[in-house]
Every structure is written in C-alpha cells, then in structure tokens.
Image (cartoon, rainbow, N blue to C red):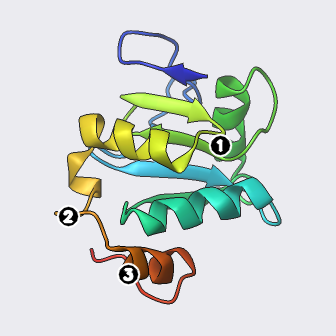
Amino acid sequence: MSRQDDEAPRAGETAGSDHVPGAEGSVLVYTRPGCPFCVSLRAGLRRHGVRFEESDIWQDERAAATVRELADGNETVPTVVIGPWSWSAVNPSAEAVRAAAAEHAPGALPDSEPGLVDGALRAMGLRAVPS
C-alpha cells in the first residue's frame, strides 16, 4: 500500500497541528521495539546506503496516529514516509523504499551503491552510512 503526491488526506495531521511526518527530502521509518520486519528493513536500507530517520510508535503518540491513518487503523510497522507526504508505504521492501527515495528524496541516497562487503557491514551496523 503506498500513497502518491496527489492523494489525500495527510495522515497524522489534525486541525491546527503543525505535525508533518518527514522533512523535505528525508526518509522516515516508523518502527516499534522487537519488530523483526523493522530490523529487516533497517538492515536493507543500510545495505543500500539509504539515510533515514526513525520514529518509535510506542514512544510517540503522534507517530502512532500517523501509522494508524496510513495502515487502515492498525499500527503496522515498518511504515515509511518520504518527504512531507511525497510517498508512503506500509511494510515496504528496502528496494521499494530505495526506488521511491531515488524519485522523491535523492539526497537520502549515496553517490554510488555500496559494494557487497561494504553493504553487508552497513546492514549489520558495523559500518556507518555516510551522512
């Protein structure tokens, strides 16, 4: 499930709220502790060198509300928002997020795809993704 630019509503926003998930050109991943799908997505994004921010829906009620809006009332994670509502998806693959970032947040991608060893070390958290 993904949302494109021209689709409404802007989930997580309420009347008078200035809460807009994801900054211009950023990748925001909504997660929760102990989620194996979140671990897998984070590893895949690191492997590809994608820079992303993370928000724990168990620690931030507004983040949880955003996820519920995008996931038909469920708190399904990982949920990803790129830019301020340029693209969103519930439980996407790392490859889908990378492709969407290439279109909507190219600054979140590395200048070149990491090699096999470098990507594996990044995926395991043993090498940082350059900022």
Residue drawn 37% across the image and 35% down it: 84
Q: Secondary structure at mark 1?
A: helix
Residue drawn 47% across the image and 60% down it: 45
- The residue where tag 3 is placed is 118
Residue at the front extreme of this rendering: 116
- The residue where tag 2 is placed is 112
- Inspect the image, locate mark 2, and give the three-letter code of the amino acid beneath it: Ser
Considering only order in the chain, which callout, 1 or 3, is on the residue closer to the N terminus? 1
Whole-angstrom CA distance, mark 1 to mark 2, is 35 Å
Q: Is residue 110 rendered to the left or right of residue 45?
A: left
Question: Residue 127 at what x, y percent from top left?
Answer: 43, 87
Nearer-the-camera pick, 7 or 66: 7
Say the numbered circle drawn on residue 62: 1
Considering only order in the chain, which callout, 3 or 2, is on the residue closer to the N terminus? 2
Confirm whether residue 88 shows in the render.
yes
Q: Is residue 19 rendered to the left or right of residue 24?
A: right
Residues packed near mark 2 inside 10 Å, few (<14), some (14 to 19) or many (20 plus)? few
Residue drawn 68% across the image and 57% down it: 38
Considering only order in the chain, which callout, 2 or 1, is on the residue closer to the N terminus? 1
> Looking at the figure, which quarter contains the N terminus?
top right
Question: Residue 85 at what x, y percent from top left?
Answer: 41, 29
Q: Within the image, what quadrant is residue 34 found in? A: bottom right
Question: Residue 99 at what x, y percent from top left?
Answer: 36, 39
Question: Residue 4 at what x, y percent from top left?
Answer: 41, 18
Confirm whether residue 22 shows in the render.
no
Whole-angstrom CA distance, mark 3 to mark 1, is 35 Å
